[in-house]
Amino acid sequence: MKKQLLSLCIVMGTVAFAQSTDGPKFGIKAGGNISGITGDDTQSKFGIYAGALVNIPVSKEFSIQPEIVYSSQGAKAKDSYNVAGYRFTNMKQILNYINIPVMFQYNAAPKFYLEAGPEFGFLVNAKAKADINGKPYDTSNKDSLKTFNFGLGIGLGYKFTPNLGINARYTAGLTDIVKNGGGETSKNTNFQLGLVIIFK
């Protein structure tokens, strides 16, 4: 009798869970970044991001959303510099990542949600750009940077329809991105704003 009752409870729980949640939903997202690198001599730069996602409902209130996103990040130098007779202006660090955020979302209202979760970043390429004595110059400096980046993201979103929404997210880097920083740490910061499209 106990085994039959336990089996019945398991079946009822499974049915209730299936009725209370939808299946996974796939989608795409794209928008703009305002990114930076921590340090007194840097300022933010604009970039873009685009990627794919899968939203996995756990209940009516909660879902898990893994993503894979190409993100153009980096920072600009605040000032110009004179070194050995050369004048460096318009200096910029460009960092292109493949980021894998895993967001835990809470549906605070039918069309509004909050989210938070870790982000795992993999550096695809890096380029330093500057004008040297008025002439543009750029070079790859990926070898001086760490290829893995870990951060924590928080954000919110609004659904205009079940298939179209807007998302804003801030991700703070928790790991140093430079291999040999001379005792100083440099971490990514990134604010994203863009559209989310869900396919049914």
Image (cartoon, rainbow, N blue to C red):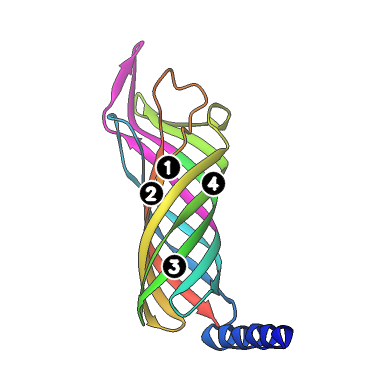
First reached walking from the N terminus: tag 3 or tag 4: 3
Mark 1 and mark 2 in contact? Answer it, CB < 8 Å: yes
Residue at the farthest front position: 1
Which label was assigned to residue 124?
Answer: none
Question: What number is the disc on residue 173?
Answer: 1
CB under 8 Å between callouts 2 and 3?
no
Residue type, label 4: Gly
Point out residue 130 in the picture as x, y percentages from the top left corner. 39, 31
Q: Counting residues from the N terminus, which is met first, the one under dot 4 or under dot 2?
A: 4
Element at label 2:
strand
**Distance CA(mark 1)–CA(mark 2):** 8 Å
Mark before the other along the chain sequence, 4 or 1: 4
Label 4, secondary structure: give it: strand
Q: Mark 2 points at which residue?
A: 190
Front-most of residues 10 and 109 = 10
- The CA span between labels 2 and 3 is 19 Å
Element type at mark 3: strand
Q: Residue 105 carries which label?
A: 3
Q: What stretch is highlighted in magenta?
A: 68-93
Mark 4 to mark 2 CA distance (whole Å): 12 Å
| Within-10-Å neighbours for mark 1: few <14, some 14–19, many 20+ | many
The quarter of the image holding the C terminus is bottom right
Seen in the picture, residue 80 relative to 121 is either above or below; the reply is: above
Pointer 4: what residue?
A: 121
Amino acid type indicated by mark 1: Gly
